[in-house]
Image (cartoon, rainbow, N blue to C red):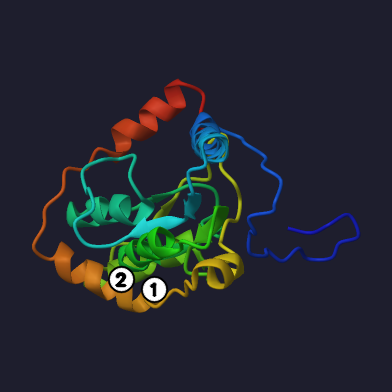
């Protein structure tokens, strides 16, 4: 993408201070829950910390739910010999954070008694394209199945989204420790002993029927 002068636009990490631009009911519900918790905390003197999780992945996540994380969805497709379906051109960037780092962030938030309130991004602080995720997962599984780029997009989806974790580093002492390559290897080792029911096409058909995939 380029700006009006033709200069290429470079995606940057998302800080907690970014004004919300809610494009879906899902995003609105998460934001409302966060605001409600912080409001109750202030009103009743309850120390409250809101953690904004980015794309969490890891062993023992649901594989047969087509509305779960994209890594689990891609895994379900590959385990059934099907091509992962990717919206847009596959170059949209996301932040994948290991469940181990998320669990550690939750512990740090519970132990941060000096905080009365706060909002913190919990992510890896790095980005990777959705196409690369599908290709690397297939490679780790020993599969030569390539992803299918649908060219469609989901209403409300954001083009790029990855975390600025500097506030969590300063406020909670949080620093992501699991690199994507390490976390993916752990996930794949667990996947080798799992099976999944692929409901992705049904979910895609529902999105199209409701006008949410264009």
Q: Position of residue 70 (x, y in %)?
A: 37, 52
Q: Position of residue 182 (x, y in %)?
A: 32, 78
Residue 143 visible: no
Looking at the picture, tell me which residue is in the foreground, 208 or 125: 125
Q: Quadrant of the N terminus?
A: bottom right
Q: How many marks?
A: 2
Q: Quadrant of the C terminus?
A: top right
CB within 8 Å, label 1 to label 2: yes
Q: Which residue is mark 2?
A: 184
Q: CA distance from mark 1 to mark 2?
A: 6 Å
Residue at x-position 48% and y-position 64%: 123
Q: Position of residue 7 (x, y in %)?
A: 84, 65
Q: Which residue is mark 1?
A: 180
Q: Residue furthest left?
A: 193
Looking at the picture, tell me which residue is in the foreground, 208 or 13: 13
Crowding around mark 2 (Cα neighbors within 10 Å: few <14, some 14 to 19, many 20+) is many
Q: Is residue 164 left or right of residue 82?
A: right
Residue at x-position 47% and y-position 71%: 174
Q: Is 182 located above or below residue 143 in the figure?
A: below
Residue at x-position 39% and y-position 73%: 180
């Amino acid at each position: 993408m380029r700006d009006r002068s033709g200069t290429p636009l470079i995606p940057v990490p998302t800080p907690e201070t970014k004004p919300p631009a809610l494009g879906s009911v899902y995003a609105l519900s998460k934001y409302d829950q966060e605001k409600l918790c912080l409001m109750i905390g202030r009103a009743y003197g309850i120390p409250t910390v809101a953690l904004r999780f980015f794309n969490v992945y890891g062993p023992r996540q649901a594989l047969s739910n087509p509305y779960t994380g994209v890594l689990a969805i891609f895994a379900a497709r590959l385990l059934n010999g099907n091509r992962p379906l990717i919206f847009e051109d596959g170059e949209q960037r996301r932040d994948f954070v290991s469940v181990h780092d998320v669990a550690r962030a939750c512990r740090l938030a519970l132990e941060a008694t000096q905080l009365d309130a706060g909002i913190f991004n919990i992510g890896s602080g790095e980005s990777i394209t959705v196409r690369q995720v599908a290709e690397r997962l297939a490679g780790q599984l020993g599969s030569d199945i390539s992803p299918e780029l649908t060219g469609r997009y989901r209403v409300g989806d954001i083009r790029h989204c990855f975390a600025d974790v500097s506030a969590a580093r300063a406020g909670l002492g949080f620093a992501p420790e699991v690199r994507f390559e390490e976390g993916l290897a752990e996930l794949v080792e667990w996947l080798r002993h799992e099976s999944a029911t692929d409901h992705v096409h049904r979910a895609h058909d529902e999105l199209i029927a409701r006008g949410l995939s264009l």
